[in-house]
């Protein structure tokens, strides 16, 4: 494969031969397991068109700063050392932007997958390159969040290593949100879940748009206590073990995360894998999913609901904003009449 190095660890991946899943990449330190993250830059939908015809969704400005900067800040604060940004559209623009970030405390690789048309295809592409060596964060798109990721990773590792539960392959992050505050615009965003309150294991995951909650009673046989929750929103982040990538490779017809992967794991009569949940009652979590959510994110940042990720922090950007008063931020040298 060919790798073109960028400033301070930022690099662009030009091509790479397939490797057996689970093997360590030859260009990485074989003696060290570093914390990694996969960021899926595309949604593989047209919700944001026509503005995404020329600008990738992850580079759309939120309070005049590219949304991707907020996501990279989140991953950096969680101790991530390697980030793989998977992009099928406008990967050249994402690479150009990443190359300008000269102060990142971790390396970034933009994986160009021009022929991918689904998240499943993108995950299979990553698996074929054999770059993931341990538990990793999976982030769907441009996420802005103040939820602490380290705690979720520690719980996931404790479940697998201390409790010897190797079937626990994923911990999905949810944000509690009262039903009257839910603003889901699409079916996959409006979900109800069944959870074992003692273990936090996810038992059932279902879209609620245009249908009633329905679950096979057999799903409850191994769970004496079950909570049905309609007050959660998926935060577009999860902690995964390498088996997740292998599952996408083995199940070639799994294309979508919500419609295929999660229900496929939960209802499989062959697989014994389990998905767990982490519910955060504090902190902020939002992502660029559609034009409505994009508008909401900008307002939340300007109105300081995402503190400390506010404009005057000048996050990974050559700006000099200062907070004047509610809703007003000024750059150095700017005067208001």
Image: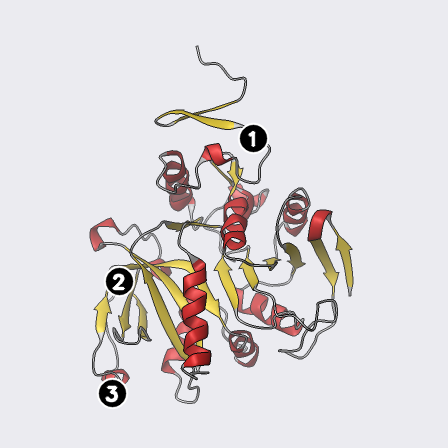
Secondary structure state at the residue bearing disc 3: loop
Secondary structure state at the residue bearing disc 2: loop
Q: Nearer the viewer, mark 3 or mark 1?
A: 1
Q: Quadrant of the N terminus?
A: bottom right
x%, y% of residue 97?
64, 44
Task: Return the disc, 3 or 1, that comes first in the chain's sequence.
Answer: 3
* Mark pair 3, 2: CA separation: 28 Å
Q: Is 281 in front, or is 66?
A: 281
Give the answer, above or below, for where 79 lies relative to 221.
above
x%, y% of residue 27?
74, 67
Q: Quadrant of the C terminus?
A: top left
Q: Does 276 sit left or right of 70 as displayed? A: left
Q: Does 14 sit left or right of 170 as displayed? A: right
Query: Would you name the residue on which mark 3 appears?
Result: 221
Residue drawn at the location 50% of the way across and 28% of the way down = 321
Q: Is residue 212 visible?
A: no
Q: Nearer the viewer, mark 2 or mark 1?
A: 1
* Mark pair 2, 1: CA separation: 45 Å
> Tags 3 and 2 in contact by the CB under 8 Å rule?
no
Query: Would you name the residue on which mark 1 appears?
Result: 319
Secondary structure state at the residue bearing disc 1: loop
Indicate the quadrant where residue 231 lies.
bottom left
Indicate the quadrant where residue 86 lies.
bottom right
Give the answer, above or below, for where 74 lies relative to 266.
above
> Tags 2 and 1 in contact by the CB under 8 Å rule?
no
Query: Would you name the residue on which mark 2 appears?
Result: 210
Q: Does 197 sit left or right of 312 as displayed? A: left
């Amino acid at each position: 494969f060919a790798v073109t190095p960028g400033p301070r660890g930022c690099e662009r991946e030009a091509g790479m031969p397939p490797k057996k899943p689970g093997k360590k990449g030859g260009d990485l330190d074989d003696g060290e397991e570093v914390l990694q993250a996969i960021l899926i830059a595309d949604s593989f939908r047209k919700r944001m068109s026509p503005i995404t015809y020329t600008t990738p969704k992850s580079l759309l400005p939120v309070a005049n700063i590219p949304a991707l900067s907020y996501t990279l800040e989140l991953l950096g604060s969680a101790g991530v050392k390697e980030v793989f940004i998977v992009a099928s559209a406008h990967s050249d623009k994402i690479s150009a932007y990443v190359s300008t970030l000269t102060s990142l405390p971790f390396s970034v690789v933009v994986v160009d997958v021009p022929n991918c048309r689904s998240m499943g295809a993108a995950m299979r592409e990553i698996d074929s390159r054999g770059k993931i060596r341990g538990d990793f964060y999976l982030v769907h798109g441009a996420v802005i969040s103040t939820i602490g990721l380290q705690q979720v990773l520690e719980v996931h590792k404790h479940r697998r290593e201390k409790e010897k539960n190797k079937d626990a392959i994923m911990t999905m992050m949810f944000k509690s949100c009262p039903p009257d505050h839910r603003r889901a615009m699409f079916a996959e965003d409006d979900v109800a879940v069944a959870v074992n309150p003692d273990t936090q294991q996810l038992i059932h995951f279902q879209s609620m748009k245009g249908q009633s909650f329905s679950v096979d009673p057999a799903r409850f046989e191994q769970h004496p206590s079950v909570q049905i929750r309609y007050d959660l929103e998926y935060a577009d982040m999860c902690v995964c073990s390498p088996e997740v990538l292998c599952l996408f490779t083995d199940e070639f017809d799994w294309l979508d995360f919500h419609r295929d992967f999660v229900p496929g794991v939960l209802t499989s009569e062959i697989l014994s894998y389990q998905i767990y949940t982490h519910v955060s009652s504090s902190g902020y979590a939002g992502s660029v999913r559609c034009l409505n959510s994009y508008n909401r994110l900008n307002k939340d940042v300007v109105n300081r609901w995402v503190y400390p990720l506010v404009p005057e922090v000048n996050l990974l950007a050559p700006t000099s904003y200062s907070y004047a008063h509610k809703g007003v931020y000024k750059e150095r040298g700017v005067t208001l009449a």
